[in-house]
Amino acid sequence: MAWNEPGKDDKKDQDPWNKNDKKNEQGPPDLDVVFQKISGFLGGLFGKKSTQGPSSGNSGNGGKVVAIAILSVIAIVWFASGWYTIKESDRGVVLRFGAYHSQVEPGLHWNPKFVDQIIPINVEAFRTLPTSGFMLTEDENIVQVSMEIQYRIVEPEKYLFSVTNADNSLLQALDSSLRFVIGHSTMDDALTTGREVVRQETWEMLNKIIESYHLGIQILDVNLQQTRPPEQVRDAFDDAIAAQEDEERFVREAEAYEREKEPIARGQVKRIEQQARSYEEGIILEAQGAVAKFNQLLPEYQANPEVTRQRLYIETMEKVLGNASKVLIDNKAGGNLTFLPLDKLMDKSNNTTRLPVETEIETRSREDQKADLDERAAINERASRSSRTTGRDY
């Protein structure tokens, strides 16, 4: 039934806003009246009696409609606010009323607002944690060490709830491991040759420590950045390290020189061995040829000893005098004798066939030989002059 139905003048206008004094006005109601109606409706819901007389029933129904509308809007907003997205590199840790409930994968999800809490944790990013400080070595020296580790989170729920602060616990474990390893190493090892050993032992000990804490962290790399002595003695240690590096460099250069010269020496040894074998074979063959030649001459010598002896003598003298520079001439006719300087001609022919490149010793030997030949030629010339006067032959 309409609240302002025409034709019923004996009843008051059934105005829901209870404004009988303004029945002819069509404007909006006052806010005070609206809030009064809402408070009356809420009071009726909680058992309070209405004080508005006969219009309380209709006003109660209108208030219920408004309350249901408000609650519906709140429910829609609450439901819409429950949707969330987890990135591809993250994992979501679900807390229900503050306690761990589950873990969600990347994608679009919904959770009841004000009941669940979502904490996204990046499980693919590489995190870096550095540490440094002055540490005591086994030989009671002090070194300044800087180390850095790289890690990532593999189990988000353990990373959040196993300890109070996983990053701080990891830092304490790293510092403890590094100090233990440096304390069992000498200063020279920590500064020079033992750096890789320090790095590996620190990594192994760090893994053992964090395994018992269940931090949900995986160590990817341990980098020993710097180890150096205190500033007061740094120059002396720099000189010592430079000397060790020079020693290593000299050793490497010597090894390289050895690798370079050894094949050459081995080649020379092989060549000398081959030459020796060739010389051996040549001498053996020459001896065998001489024996065979003697065996051939023996029957001839036994048949004609005088002729064979004379022929052997002539051949031997030919070989001997063939290398001599003196020329013997039998001049039975007497008088002047003209002869060719065969020794000089032979020396000249030898010089023309000599190799163009000579050593200093060969050059000096050739000059001495030439001087000797000149002296011998002068002696022969004086002897020829004296032979002309005396008539003797030389």
Image: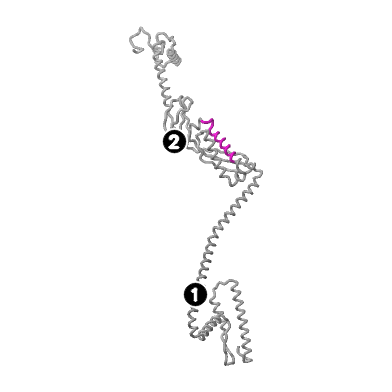
Q: Please tell me which of labels 1 and 2 falls first in the chain.
A: 2
Mark 1 neighbour class, 10 Å CA radius: few under 14, some 14 to 19, many 20 or more: few
Q: Which marked residue is nearer to the observer: mark 1 or mark 2?
A: 1
Mark 2 neighbour class, 10 Å CA radius: few under 14, some 14 to 19, many 20 or more: few
Q: Estimate the x, y position of residue 281 in percent, counting from the top left.
A: 50, 70
Image quadrant in which you'd find residue 81: top left
Q: Quadrant of the image for the C terminus?
A: bottom right
Could you tell me what secondary structure mostly forms the magenta stretch?
Answer: helix
Image quadrant in which you'd find residue 179: top right
Which residue is disc 1 drawn over? 288
Q: Estimate the x, y position of residue 348 in percent, counting from the top left.
A: 56, 79
- Would residue 378 appear left or right of 115 to someone viewing this image? right
Which residue sits furthest right? 232
Tell me the CA gap for discs 1 and 2.
94 Å
Q: Estimate the x, y position of residue 202 in percent, counting from the top left.
A: 56, 40
Which residue sits furthest front? 302
- The residue drawn where x is 46% and y is 34% is 90
168 drawn magenta:
yes
Helix, strand or loop status at disc 1 = helix
177 drawn magenta:
yes
Which residue sits furthest top? 10
Which residue is disc 2 drawn over? 88
Helix, strand or loop status at disc 2 = loop
Indicate the amino acid at tag 1: Gln
Report the front residue among 30 and 196.
Answer: 196
Q: Does 104 sit above or below residue 227? A: above
Image quadrant in which you'd find residue 67: top left
Q: Which residues are magenta?
A: 162-181
Indicate the amino acid at tag 2: Glu
